[in-house]
Image (spheres, rainbow, N blue to C red):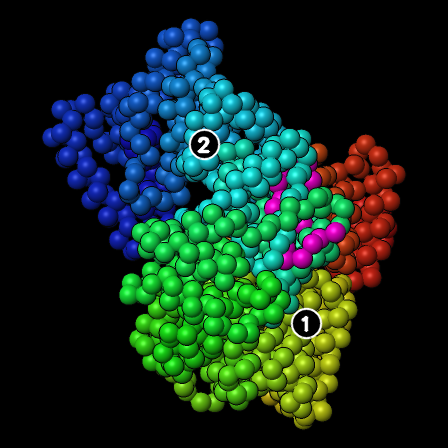
Amino acid sequence: MMAIDLNRLVTISDMVDELWPELPPRSAIPNIRTYAANLRRTLAQAAGGEAAVLRQQGGYRMAAPPDIVDLVRSQRRIAQGRALAVANDRSAAISALADVVKNWPGPLLAGLPVGPALAARREAVEQEHEEALVLLAGLLLSDEQPDEAVALLRPHASRHPTRERLQVLLMEALLANDDAAGAADVYRSARAALDEEFGVRPGSRAEQLYRLAVEARPRLLSSAGHAAGAGGAEGPGAINWLPRSEADFVGRDDVLGKILTRIRQRSHTTVVQVIDGMAGCGKTTLAVRLAELLRPEHPDGQLFIDLRGHGDAAPLEPAAVLLTLLRQLGVPAGRVPTDLDDRVQLWHRELAPRRVVVVLDNAAGGDQVLPLIPKGPGKVVLVTARSRLLETALGVPESLGVLSRAEAVRLLALTAGVDRVSAEPEAAEEVVQRCGRLPLAIRLAGARLAHRPSWRVTDLASRLADERGGIEQLAIGDQTVAGAFAASYEPLSIRSRRVFRMLAVHPGDDLSSPMAAALADLPLSETVRILDDLVNRHLLEETGSGRFRLHDLVREYATELTRRLDEQQALLAAVDRLLELCLHASLSVAIRLESQLDAKSLVAEPPARPDLLAELRPDIDWLERERASLTALVVYAAKLGRDGLAWRLARALWRFCYMRSYFDDILLMNQHGLLAAERLGDRAAAAQMQNYLASAYVRTSNYPEATRLVESTVAIYQELNDGRSAARYRANLGVIYWLTGRLAAAVQLGRELRREELLLGHVSIDYVLPNYGIALAAVGRYTEALELHRLHLFLARTKGDQFHLLNALGHIGMVRARMGDHDRAIRIMEASIRLRDRTGHRYGEPELRVDLGVALRNLGRFGDARRQHEIALRLALDNGERHAQCAALNELGTTAAVQGDRVEAARLHEQALNLATRIAHPQEQGRALARLGDLIAQEDRSEARRLWRRALAIFERTGGPEQHGVRALLGEDN
């Protein structure tokens, strides 16, 4: 501190605050004096008398020549460089600034713990360094040295991806250096970082430079002769969701050339190319190959999704498809709207500046595909389908036939061995003919030969000729693809055959080896060996380490076998084993996320296969990885009548899906769970499913349906004479009342539940106190609210419940802030945030940061306030909490106004007003209207009064305390 404030007095109190910002020890002042004495001796020995620590009244001062401190030297050199630049002495300015940047000592006091004063100074010094770096880069660009500017900027821009000024300057340098692809990569990385950190897009200058880069890149590629070709390396920001391409791709040269020409001739618009044909003819392989060949002209991404148009699972709805595609683009789940039209609009906006290829595989029909077609140039959509799609908007399809005889034999030779096939040309012709010249069937047959070196090609041809039956829709004359599958299935052992058939029972896209072991009821080690064998025989695909999937055709074949060979009871027993394993795994994570979950009500018995449960190692990441399969499993269980397991698995998955904003999954699972519970006649289970359905409806702003479901839940428990559960779920109505502006009803409900708890002990106090306190604070009864939240805090501490502890702290801080005790409020709310960081709980954090920002703003800390509001907005967007988005937008607008940016403030309040109106959130509607009136009061008093009157009408209806302030603005009596 003394070196930084050289030749100035640093008080002892400042030193104490810096060294012990939280709680200084009793010996703080003696310690300071000891440190100063030791430093005085050290400097006397090391600095040759140039520097000395002098004791003065109230503190200490370091006396030394300014240039002895490296920071001071750097600052003087920066000032010199800036002056030379102003004087237009570019060469001397570059020399001075380059010396500073090259010899910059690094972050101030790097690696040392610092207090608030030095932390602020460290940030200021880093800002000075960045200013010097930006000035130097600008001078280098002006001096036509873009390569030097790129080398200077790139490491700093990489370390600070959200500092837009650095990113824009780097893009300018790269464009000046004819590196349009690099400039586009910088934009994409910056956009992803800004979206992840703040939920915002880059500014207009960055957008403009990106458009220049995208337009320039094809010209640069052309002038370079397309040196990279189709196999060129992907850029660091490339998005590639294509499955692995087949190494033995054969033929189709005419089709590839025709489609590529067609696409390149229509590059001025979105190109849709449908590829249809019979199952197994190589449609997906061809589409992936096309996408790879188109990658140089479409560098911004290759997306891929299976639309499940054919198979036992229902085709994906367009809304579900868009969720997956948007997630592939990096859009957080919480930012994806629930309404299909809104998802389509977001899809169009995300793709607008990009040049991408989208592969929509295995389409069911045109209705499924049409909502997914983007707009504008630079987009190619490849659609594969087993049947023709006749919609004119999808263009003329390319119907893919089978391979030619020569291509088919060549493919067999690549898979089975060139020498073997060349030695028996007539048998090879027979094999490919029996395979219908379908690529998938030929590959399977070739793999069979490769794994049976003692077989002749004639042996396989004879086996294929003897096969009967199969999947009728895949027949080609007298031959079927099932013949090829059977040739691989027949040599399996009895157990391997059974494992193969059981894999088709799993309803998801892929599964892990422990899940396969549960289905097969075998030891894991034996299951893994069988799975590896099935992979080697091309009956199974390994999608990742220990994860497997059946190709659609193979799944259909296996399903047909189960229908013919396996008893229904055996299939249901396999489903039950899988459900039981997944329920225990999901529940083991759920109890960590939801401390009050009654696990015994969901599973009364220990896991049947603890070995498999241990192998799964279930955690949050496991739930994320298996989410789609677990959701499908709930639906499948309900359809099979495994009702008890269906609703229990839906219940176990609720908290995870709620935390991650997977509201579509909550709705789907709990709708089927509700049907299952009703079939069982289990009214308590049905009530739980209704309650958790309501939770998704609340988060998606369907308040009427949420209210109906919660009220029905309460009624069921009342009829069951379960007063405790009825009161617990009745407490959830308080949240709905609060969000919909029925504040008096929320307060009345809280009072009644509090009375019931005190008199009857019907409901855990944890469910009553928070909501009741929030309702009281919403109507301005802060003292009563504070009392309830402090009681909540006491009980949470008594129980050691971290979740309730952090929530109680947040609520206390919120009330303190509204009471005007901002310093104390800030300390309490920051403690709540630290506890959230330590425990990983994020529930209610957006609202907490909104209130923290308000307290900071009221103390004049506008920059800190804005930062908290921006974080709150990002969290609310990611979580899909639209009511919290409204609050963050309103407070961000208010902070912008006090900082003098009235235009930005008006934009933010209008955003908040539109969103609050759309979700029927009256409090934030009123706040947005009142603050918009404040902004225009000086210029247009009449319009301001109109806005205030609208706000007053809302506040009077809800009973919010804001009505008093608005009345004062209107000059009315309170």
Query: Could you tell me the amino acid type at mark 1?
Result: Ala
Of the two numbered discs 1 and 2 in the rendering, the one whose residue sits closer to the viewer = 2
Residue 521 belongs to magenta span: no
The quarter in which the N terminus is drawn is top left
Q: Are marks 1 and 2 in contact (CB under 8 Å)?
A: no
What is the x, y in percent for residue 25?
30, 55
Instruction: Give the image location of residue 500, x and y in percent.
Output: 44, 74
| Quadrant in which residue 43 is drawn | top left
Residue 686 sits above or below residue 351 on the image: below
Residue farthest along the bottom direction in this orientation = 721
Q: Is residue 956 visible?
A: yes
Q: Is residue 372 magenta?
A: yes
Q: Write the residue at 21% across / 42% down.
A: 35
- Residue extending farthest front: 426
Mark 2: few, some, or many residues within 10 Å (few <14, many ≥20)? few
Q: On screen, 695 above or below 266?
A: below
Residue behind mark 1: 694
* Extent of the magenta region: 371-390
**Residue at the spot x=24%, y=31% of the render?**
54
Q: Position of residue 770 (x, y in %)?
A: 60, 70
